[in-house]
Image (tube, rainbow, N blue to C red):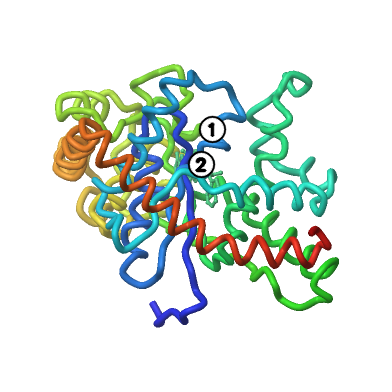
Amino acid sequence: MTTPTPQERVFSGVQPSGDLHLGNYLGAIVQFVELQRHYQCIYCIVDLHAITVWQEPERLRENIRATAAAYIAAGIDPKEQVIFAQSSVTAHAELAWMFNCVARIGWLNRMTQFKEKVGKNRENASVGLYVYPVLMAADILAYHATHVPVGEDQKQHLELARDIAAKFNNDFAGGEVFFPQPEPLITAEACRVMSLRDGKSKMSKSDASEMSRILLTDDAESIVRKIQKAKTDAHPLPGEVAGLEGRPEAENLVGIFAALEGVKREEVLRRYGGGNFAGFKKDLAEVAVARLVPMGEEMRRLCGDADYLDGVLQDGASRAESLARPILNRARELVGLP
Ligand code: AMP
Ligand code: TRP
């Protein structure tokens, strides 16, 4: 990685909408941890995004703290980086409104995540869910963030944020680059962790089957059981990555193994190619337990200390506020708001 310039800044967010799973961890949080070595990082708990679908209020309060606990247990330093809840800094909602007036309906109609989430039930989805990517653009641009680590599913939303930045600059800043173009950072090895029950669908908080996902708070026994029961196919593991084609379950497990060990999939297949799934799964379970169980224990310990977590969130909110305020004020001025 080249040395970042002082203007470079990382922003990302996770929704406090349920239990965090291996997809969130490998697709996003692992990168968050790595990036703090090189960048100033702002890690948000996007509660306003979470309420685009109904959340039980007491559970939401708990989940906000649990997400902060996950960030910290994974290794993000809350003193060096900024960890806070989105709704505590009003700039997000204010800028999102201005961006609602910049983004075009045609742009939002192309968002595949919205289409996938609502299916045939579009008329009954919240308006918030529809404009969700606009709020996400506001999150990023309110800090002039330049780098955004996310899973692959968020790439299209990042492109929308870039379009909004460009149109705002064009419409209000005379073409000056007031909002920089944010870049997605997506790691190849685990950009998309799939369900353990179906290699074609994403590992997700909302999947009906608990066996489809490994939670960050799962104990060793559950992790081992879920990996042992994970769906596979009848063939031995291939010796090369090309041999994973058309074998989504095998591809997923190999990808998870590689991401957990921080090696390439080629390396995993060099070791296990030609072998059956039983031995591979045994080793995978061992690697997963060693990596996840200590983190889960730390998360549980932190969740028992609400005062500490609330302190971290308050401190983060006031630092985030002072970064976003001047940018919001300038945006207001450019638009002509008093
Ligand atoms: P969410 O919890 O939906 O707010 O997602 C938080 C982060 O985790 C985002 O960067 C997502 O792209 C990432 N993520 C969620 N599910 C997966 C998955 N199954 N595989 C990879 N990344 C994921
Ligand atoms: N939409 C993201 C997700 O579901 C979460 C998110 C909200 C986000 N605002 C963001 C991610 C800003 C990166 C930057 O995963």
From the viewer's perspective, tell me whether residue 6 is left or right of residue 71: right
Q: Residue furthest front?
A: 338
Q: Nearer the viewer, residue 100 or 217?
A: 100
Compared with 3, 106 (above or below) is above
Looking at the image, can residue 280 be seen?
no
Compared with 70, 337 (above or below) is below
Q: Quick one: quadrant of the C terminus?
A: bottom right
Q: Is mark 2 within 8 Å of ligand 2?
A: yes
In percent of width and height, residue 296 lies at 21, 36
In percent of width and height, residue 150 lies at 49, 52
Secondary structure found at label 2:
loop
- The residue sitting at 57% across, 37% down in the picture is 49
Compared with 290, 76 (above or below) is below
In percent of width and height, residue 325 lies at 58, 61
Q: Is mark 1 within 8 Å of ligand 1?
A: no
Mark seen at residue 50: 1
Q: Residues within 10 Å of mark 1 (few under 14, many from 20)?
A: many
When asked about the image quadrant of residue 59, the answer is: top left
Compared with 213, 82 (above or below) is below
Q: Quick one: quadrant of the N terminus?
A: bottom left
Mark seen at residue 310: none
From the viewer's perspective, tell me whether residue 80 is left or right of residue 333: left
- The residue sitting at 27% across, 57% down in the picture is 77
Question: Is there CB contact under 8 Å for labels 1 and 2?
Answer: yes
- Amino acid, disc 1: Ala
- Amino acid, disc 2: Val
- The residue sitting at 76% across, 66% down in the picture is 333
- The residue sitting at 74% across, 19% down in the picture is 124
Q: Which residue bears the numbered disc 2?
A: 46
Q: Nearer the viewer, residue 254 or 190?
A: 190
Q: Residues within 10 Å of mark 2 (few under 14, many from 20)?
A: many
Looking at the image, can residue 137 be seen?
yes
